[in-house]
Amino acid sequence: MSLFQILMIAMSAFFSFKVYQHIQTLEDEKPENDDKSQNGFSPFDPQTLALKADEAFEKGDLKKAFALLDEANVKDPNNAEILGKLGYISAKEERNNEAISYYQEALYREGNNDIFHNALASLYRKSGEFSKAEEHFKEALQIDAAYDVTYYNYANLLVDMQRFAEAFVMYEKALEINPELSEAKTEMDKIKDKI
């Protein structure tokens, strides 16, 4: 074999190796700015999506926050916190039936949550379903009997139901827990003459 033939074989091998390397890098490259995977979802995990949703919510972008949480919920449908946040945004956007569904599902996943019970009670109160609202306020108090907001909101429901003496007692309990809750004092003054 001549020197020329050896050089040609070496050059062919070198160029073949370079073509092989180039083909490998083409297969490994992903398109830039492609933040969606093949199934249409982002590559982020549910916790990251929830954090991004919190950021969007803080900026006032409820639609983006909801979309991110909705995707997180698809990826982790058993996460009560994500369901609760979906319920909260739905309620903020006056989609009360949808909010109720999310909160009910959140309670199914994490039944021992007074905040979810409070939220459901407020939504039921708003829709005039007072007995359901009362059930959820009672559940919330069984879970956390030291949360002034529950007593205050329950008292407001009792006023709506014209059970003024019971409402007065609930406002008093809210003030015992939080003497700075001036709203409770104001509401008590409004119903004193109805007892």
Image: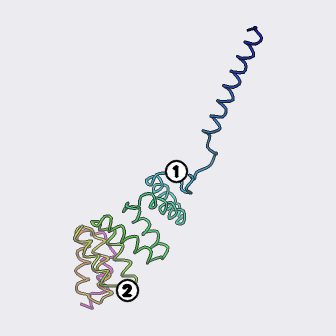
Question: Is-magenta flag for residue 136?
Answer: no
Q: Which mark is residue 128?
A: 2
Examine the image and state in which quarter residue 175 appears.
bottom left
Check disc 2 and report its element: helix, strand or loop. loop
Dot 1: few (<14), some (14–19), or many (≥20) neighbours within 10 Å?
Answer: some
Q: Position of residue 165 (x, y in %)?
A: 23, 86
Q: Secondary structure at mark 1?
A: loop
Earlier in the chain: of badge 1 and badge 2, it is 1
> Which label belongs to residue 130?
none
Q: Which residues are magenta?
A: 180-195
Split into 4 quadrants, where in the image is the N terminus? top right
Residue pointed to by mark 1: 43
Q: CA distance from mark 1 to mark 2?
A: 42 Å
Q: Nearer the viewer, mark 1 or mark 2?
A: 1
Q: Contact, CB < 8 Å: mark 1 with mark 2?
A: no
Q: Is residue 28 left or right of residue 54?
A: right
Q: Position of residue 60 (x, y in %)?
A: 53, 64
Q: Position of residue 71 (x, y in %)?
A: 49, 60
Amino acid of disc 1: Pro
Front residue of this view, candidates 145 and 18: 18
The one nearer the camera, 116 or 73, is 73
